[in-house]
Amino acid sequence: MLKVGIAQPPVVMGDKKANVAALLAAVDQAGRARCDAVVLPECGLAGWLSTSAARAAEPVPGPFTRKLAGLARRWKLIVAAGLEERSDGKIYNSAVLIDAAGRLRLHHRKINELDLGLRVYSRGDRLAVTDIDGLRLGLDICADSWTPAVTDALHLMGARVILSPCAWAVEPGGEATNIAWITETYRARTAKRALSIAASNGVGPVTQGPWKGRILQGNGLVMGPDGKRLALLDANRPSFLAVDLPV
């Protein structure tokens, strides 16, 4: 089993200091729960489509990833986290996977970005997997997992688990419909396969950008092999859950 912590912290749009504090606290919580890995949400520094994305963005490696690496070493766990990345004058919707020794093992830039997201973030152009303690892990971001080509490629590259920072935002009242669709989409990605997807989402109002007025709904989700749902976190409530994944 791989014990994975799904962190569902509050997201304060544009408040990098508050968001980083919440993310680091979630890693500590996963460490205290003796997790092997923890997944944090997408665009963790400022919130997805925040008007502060460029100001909050950092290089990879950078200050935020170094803080994550320190906690990964302290607690001896794998950390998958989403962040806004600055590189060569561009902003990317990125994610990193840091191993229990604090080493950066995967660095992913979101590929299946929505058109409105491309107004803020440049598109990624590659996928990778990594082997940690005999287990091959993949990393993607949110809607990447909605795209069969992405999950198929990671699966064909040997990934048994995909760790996926997410930012599912809906109109208030649409939470149940949205998570039902996401669940069935992830079920299709993992059906008849020895593949799991562990997805983390934040909670809180979207107060900036083109989706202002929506909410980050939470509902962190873990789909296991053969399309079996292993966990679903509550809607609209900061929370944390440790889930045992068969690998």
Image: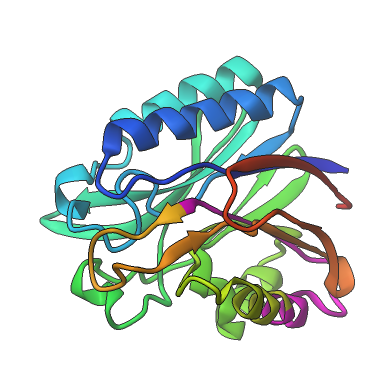
Q: For this view, does 17 lie left or right of residue 146?
A: left
Question: Could you tell me if residue 209 is visible in this image?
Answer: yes
* Front residue (pair 13, 197): 13
Q: Picture coordinates of residue 71 (x, y %)?
A: 53, 21
Q: For this view, does 47 lie left or right of residue 203?
A: left
Q: Quadrant of residue 154?
A: bottom right
Q: Is residue 191 magenta?
A: yes
Tell me: residue 71, above or below residue 149. Answer: above
Q: Picture coordinates of residue 28 (x, y %)?
A: 59, 23
Tell me: residue 31, above or below residue 3. Answer: above
**Residue bounds of the magenta highlight:** 184-203
Please report the residue visible at 31 percent of the width from the left and 42 percent of the height from the top.
60
Q: Is residue 105 magenta?
A: no
* Front residue (pair 20, 189): 20
According to the image, what is the colour scheme of the structure? rainbow
Q: Picture coordinates of residue 41 (x, y %)?
A: 50, 50
Q: Picture coordinates of residue 96 (x, y %)?
A: 46, 46
Question: Could you tell me if residue 162 is visible in this image?
Answer: no
